[in-house]
């Protein structure tokens, strides 16, 4: 958000807290609906009623509904008078209407759909039938499709009579309604009026099917710098289009998902998720982590005798494991992100793993050397210094190996490479780290013991 | 990348390995330059020469240069014959040319700029002068600006004579060259030819200055669903525009940066970064982490006497610290992402922190309870079970507190909320976890000791 917008929203909030509703409205009226919608989550009940009134008064109800977060839809609809609400819903773009309804219970969806009129109801029901994370779930159905035999001047005349506002391309179809080309508005403007669309169109445009995953849809739009991507059925008939602004939403959503999954969070959580819901969604991940932590604790318990003979080991233990966890997270982040952006896949897996293992040797050597010096300075024990050196290298190699291997294998198995991978990797570095460090210590315990 | 594209690239690679160059070229010629460019990093020297030849032969050299990763530019330029190369560079879009040159050494930049001709050299030098992560650094200068007094039909005639391909809007300027409005190609097509641009334009379009940070530029384009955003100087004169495809690149770059910073990686690293460079970029972070791990080790060393009296504590120790680290990462990821997407800021900080602390109490209670039962089942020691319960709650509260506080404070100080925050947070949970667990254990050591 721009600083100027933030300041305006702050002013509105301060005016509202002083119940200066008329002044607040005057500031609000100058803002973009996307910014106005952001205000909603900061309001109390009285202010929410004012918010709904202002949206109606300012003629921005349609725009604000389409910008409002899914978590607020149900509550907001209860505040807006029913006739005004339905008037607004009828004006929403098909994809926005679908997103809005998807935020409501199936019963509320039914009630609203029945009041929308047959054409709108059928269209929306069809869109609601597509999985929300597919091309069908994010596409819009208000595209412009014209026959390939139409002349440029005819096309321009026809477009003058249409009211769609979000169009950048005209899709060109053959007599069987199959998509055969695309013409930009710019092409229409600069082409000779007597040419046919077939003559000026870009042939065989990239398209996707309704079932294509939204991440792939966004990737295609980003990769080929498209403003919108046509969606076709199995007979190559045009059924909708995904616009670049929806692709941006998907890219942000997928990036959030990557970050969340690496941090063992469910993708549904949001900063405004109520505390009990948020806690209960994080709990399963923490319980899984507790299980893997017990595994690591079991390894330590197995070497209790060694530790009780030389208790310095207890202090050194978390260093080796912690460094492994850190290095593993580095490898994991690089590989997960490269997989997400489609830069690598399983076919180059061996090379990627080898590199991460190599980095483990190098940085394990460096940190092991530094740690060996510190251990020697601290305890004047050369054997302990050597032990730290070797354990650090081995654990950073484990970190690189699993940090690259786990997401690559998950990707190969057509799972999300980020999902649960950080738990796998930290388990490997914890268990591996303790096993190597304490295992070596128990073998060389006689040398370690101070004379 | 689409599966079909991936298959095509696999076929090309296989043909190349059998030195079936002509066949490989036939497959390659059907692909989009963005996909062809992806092939480069998989090729050996002989194949790279073939790649350059194919790009020239297919007339795709310009497009491929603009899609090639910055890390390959210097090498690729050495393969392409000089006259062909300069011909291609002259045809590159200004922003692509700037990006390409930015990948070269200042000496090489100079040589190339001098051969481009005065106009092109001046324009490119100016663009190279903007910081690469600002609006000036990512903007394009090939916009269309027309005076507000021009008629629609005059505008259309003028546009017919221009050759720019990436334009979606016409910017409207007043007699002092200040930006006053914007007209889409669609508006031009559907408006009466005798109207003036001032009559049909959208007034006071959103704009940014050349120094605006690229993250804010991308946020504005995403927030207001724009196809391009005008860049103005301090006198509100139009100097360029940032297009939505560049905004997408920024959004992906910023998301990568968030993920990398949370994983303690430098933003410059890439999956194809050579191993020595990658290792040396990760090393400082690991050394910092080693420092904080020593802090935690110091805490453990301080309680060595307690551990040597009851060595079971050594096995339980990593559980409390590890769970804290995990919960802290969860809080951190939610808060960092919400800050990055502009959903929260310091003003609601207290509420966010309170929520994360609350989640710490709840999930600390749950996991502490489970752990207490396990500890009791394992060692039949009620005091140890109680200790695990209390230590888990306290450490998950520490995790929530620091997981929310650290990024919020960094953001308030105008630093990147993700930068270094995971090291702060894991230090807090490691040191805090050991301190609470071993501190409590040393106080209650008499009760803990098995009778």
Image: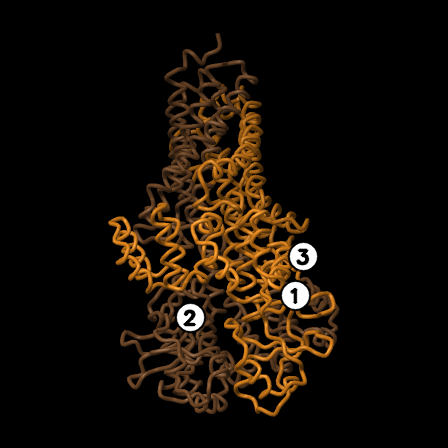
Chain colours: A orange, B brown
Tell which residue pokes out farthest to the front in this image.
A83
Query: Which residue does the image show at 42% across and 55% down from the upper left?
Result: B341
Query: Which residue does the image show at 45% across and 81% down from the upper left?
Result: B112
Report if residue A221 is visible in the image.
yes
Left/right of residue A351 with respect to residue A253 in the rendered view: right
Q: Label 2: chain?
A: B
Report if residue B260 is visible in the image.
no
Placement of the N terminus of chain B among the 4 image quadrants: bottom right
Q: Label 3: chain?
A: A
Query: Residue A370: which disc?
Result: none
Q: Which residue is mark 3?
A: A347
Label 2 secondary element: helix
How busy is the neighbourhood of tag 3: few (under 14 within 10 Å), some, or many (20 plus)?
few
Q: Alpha-carbon distance for marks 1 and 3?
A: 25 Å
Q: Which residue is mark 2?
A: B138
Image height of A199 relative to A398, above or below: below
């Amino acid at each position: 958000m721009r600083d100027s917008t933030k300041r305006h929203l702050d002013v509105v909030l301060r005016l509202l807290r002083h119940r200066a509703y008329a002044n607040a409205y005057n500031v609000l009226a100058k803002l973009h609906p996307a910014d106005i919608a952001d205000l909603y989550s900061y309001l109390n009940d009285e202010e929410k009623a004012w918010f709904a009134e202002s949206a109606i008064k300012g003629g921005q109800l349609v725009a604000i509904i389409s910008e409002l977060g899914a978590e607020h839809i149900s509550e907001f609809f209860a505040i807006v008078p029913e006739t005004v609400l339905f008037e607004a819903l009828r004006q929403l773009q098909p994809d926005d209407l679908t997103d809005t309804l998807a935020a409501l219970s199936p019963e509320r969806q039914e009630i609203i759909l029945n009041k929308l009129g047959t054409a709108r109801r059928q269209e929306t029901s069809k869109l609601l039938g597509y999985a929300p994370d597919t091309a069908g779930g994010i596409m819009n159905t208000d595209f412009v499709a014209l026959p390939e035999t139409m002349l440029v001047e005819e096309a321009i005349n026809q477009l003058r009579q249409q009211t769609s506002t979000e169009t950048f391309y005209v899709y060109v179809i053959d007599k069987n309604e199959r998509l055969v080309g695309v013409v930009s508005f710019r092409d229409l403007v600069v082409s000779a009026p007597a040419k046919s669309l077939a003559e000026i169109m870009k042939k065989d445009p990239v398209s996707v099917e309704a079932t294509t995953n939204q991440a792939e849809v966004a990737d295609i739009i980003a990769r080929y710098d498209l403003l919108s991507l046509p969606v076709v059925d199995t007979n190559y008939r045009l059924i909708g289009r995904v616009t670049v602004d929806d692709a941006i939403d998907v890219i942000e959503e997928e990036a959030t998902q990557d970050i969340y999954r690496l941090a063992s969070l469910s993708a549904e959580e949001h900063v405004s998720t109520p505390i009990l819901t948020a806690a209960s969604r994080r709990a399963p991940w923490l319980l899984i982590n507790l299980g893997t932590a017990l595994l690591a604790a079991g390894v330590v318990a197995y070497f209790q005798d060694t530790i009780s003979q030389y208790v310095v080991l207890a202090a050194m233990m978390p260093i080796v494991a912690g460094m492994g966890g850190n290095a593993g997270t580095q490898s994991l982040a690089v590989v997960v992100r490269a997989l997400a952006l489609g830069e690598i896949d399983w076919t180059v897996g061996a090379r990627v793993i080898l590199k991460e293992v190599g980095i483990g040797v190098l940085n394990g050597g460096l940190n092991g050397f530094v740690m060996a010096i510190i251990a020697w300075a601290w305890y004047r024990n050369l054997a302990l210094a050597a032990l730290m050196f070797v354990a650090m290298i081995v654990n950073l190699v484990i970190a690189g190996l699993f940090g690259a291997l786990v997401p690559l294998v998950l990707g190969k198995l057509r799972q999300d490479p980020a999902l649960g991978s950080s738990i796998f990797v930290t388990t490997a570095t914890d268990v591996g780290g303790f096993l190597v460090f304490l295992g070596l210590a128990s073998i060389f315990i006689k040398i370690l013991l101070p004379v």
